[in-house]
Image: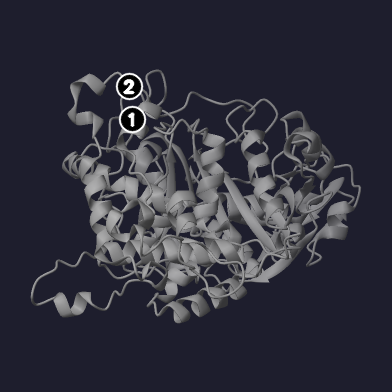
Amino acid sequence: MAGPTPSPEEREIILRDKAAREGLTVPDEVIGYIAQHRYTDQALKSALINLSAYAYRKQQPITLSMAEYVLEGVRPSTTATAVVAEEDTIEETPETSETLSQYPMPSFLTGYGSTLSEELDAREAAAVAPTEVPEYEHLNDEDIAALTAVEPIHPAEVPELAEEFPEPPIAEPEPGPTEASTLFAENAELSAAYQEVVKLNEEDMLEEELEEDEHHPLHSPEHTLVGTQSQPEARPSELGADVYFAPMATEQKRSLVERAGAALERAGLAGVVSPGDFVAIKIHCGEAGNTAFVSPIYVRKVVQLVKELGGRPFLTDANTLYSGQRANAVDHTECALHNGFSYATVEAPFIVADGLHGRDFIDVRVDGKHCPTVRIGSAAVEADAMVVISHVKGHGVAGFGGAVKNVGMGLGSRSAKQRMHSDVQPMVEAAKCTRCNRCVQWCPVQAITIDDSMGAARIDYSTCYGCGECVAACNTDAIAISLETDPNVMQEKMVEHAAGVARAKRNKMIYLSFLTNITPECDCWRYSDAPLVPDIGLMASRDMVAIDQAAYDLIVQAVGNVGSRAEDMGAGVDKFTKIHGTDGTRVISYGEEFGLGTRRYTLHEIG
């Protein structure tokens, strides 16, 4: 029986020990990357062997971009907005020959000499590129793979080495050795890395075409603001944050559900979820009648991944301020069940974050310019980790809704939502008031009394500070909700509430955003309007600001759908601003200013 999975810290220790024994120079960021994506002792060692073999063969230093390519097959996309990590390439010249010697042959390859390397080069050079042969145009993917594959090599296959190496050399000195035959014949990752060599020229040509095509969806204006990195695992600030993008189209015929899981794993889900963690999965189950919310089938995939890492997941969202089917925990739960978020469907329970009436919250200090403290649903605060699943779309007041809005507005209690929506104090409609006294009991500053002469509750505005507790308390909607506010102020308040959630989680958060059914309004409406642009795909990241910026950029560069409110809007038009008259990017720029993340990002495409 396999032992317990090592913790991230233990995995890094294993990797550093292995690198030291092999005499390898491995940067800390690469150690951290491998530890996030490999979980067992054997997998960690195998990853390091693969990476060192590739570095030796290419005579390049081990870098993070090399690790992503060799271990995960991720080639950074070249975009205008994103600062893309480039692999360092060292050209062998008399001046650099001494430098090249610092990348020694790993011990597990010692004895193969240059003969093996020459044989590999010969086999790669002989591999057929189907695109160069007209007769091969009709072949399917399996036929092409067979033609382009570079067969794994064992030293015994090379005549000069057959007698010297009748048996595979031992790769590990400790018990349970890894044989060279395993490295080349059974290790699909290394074989895949070698096979990719024959396709590099073709892919480089494609990247050059994308660079020249200014209308390609991955191009948009450059962002210059540099913010504070909110996640210690994020890339260096000059490169921005990592955003993993799965477009709707897939050359590998992988479902979007599968690629959603792959995006989360590559973004670092294992660094967020620890065994035994209560993991809140923030969703929006959609108002009754809405059809654009993220489907439960994707949520189930996230639940399964969390459980595989030893987490205890539950779905959550906070009650709404407006009167609908999600204003209290009972109706909210029924709405979630009716829209498909049952335990039988997603394999996790739905728990309303702020309780029965929306009063179960925790004050979190953020020291914002609008809110010194914010009221966040207690279940969201008390969870050990969080996966935020967002449906990217428009919003009538804020203009744009992405990860920051999903966290800030979505997990704020009902009184917090009132504070975000309104800068004025609530009003009592005497005709609806039953003088039940609930608002009097719930007012935190005793600003409400029952006025017998009015036959209704009365608010002392010299004492009231607009917290919205009375709005949440009233069962008859006698206390009116004011939704009038400065859109920029509202967006800034959302950021400050999102910061309350992030600080409570201490960086144990990850984001999965869907750029599908991109409607002009949010999912709180009882209907869904025509999507503004064609479906784009999905994204995952550890940075909520970067993922929102990347999503906004791709939507701006998309062409409006015929029959939608963006029908006449071409690539480069800010759809949300033109439709709602509000600059929806304030939530992104203020999020960076407030330290939630960075607007600079590196976009990695997942096929």
Q: Quadrant of residue 327?
A: top right
Q: Quadrant of residue 391?
A: top right
The residue labelled by disc 1 is 144
In the drawing, does residue 415 fall left or right of residue 264? right
Q: Give how far across and how far down residue 468 sits, in percent.
A: 71, 55
> Spatial distance from mark 2 to mark 1, Cα to Cα?
6 Å
Residue 57 lies, with reference to residue 486, above or below; the image says: below
Q: Give how far across and how far down residue 107 sits, in percent.
A: 40, 73
Question: At numbered mark 2, what does the secondary structure look like: helix, strand or loop?
Answer: loop
Residues at badges 2 and 1 in contact (C-beta under 8 Å)? yes
Quarter of the image with the N terminus in it:
bottom right
Question: At numbered mark 1, what does the secondary structure look like: helix, strand or loop?
Answer: helix
Q: Amino acid at mark 2?
A: Leu
Nearer to the camera, 206 or 181: 181
Q: Amino acid at mark 1?
A: Ile
The residue positioned 18% from the left and 42% from the top of the image is 205
The residue labelled by disc 2 is 139
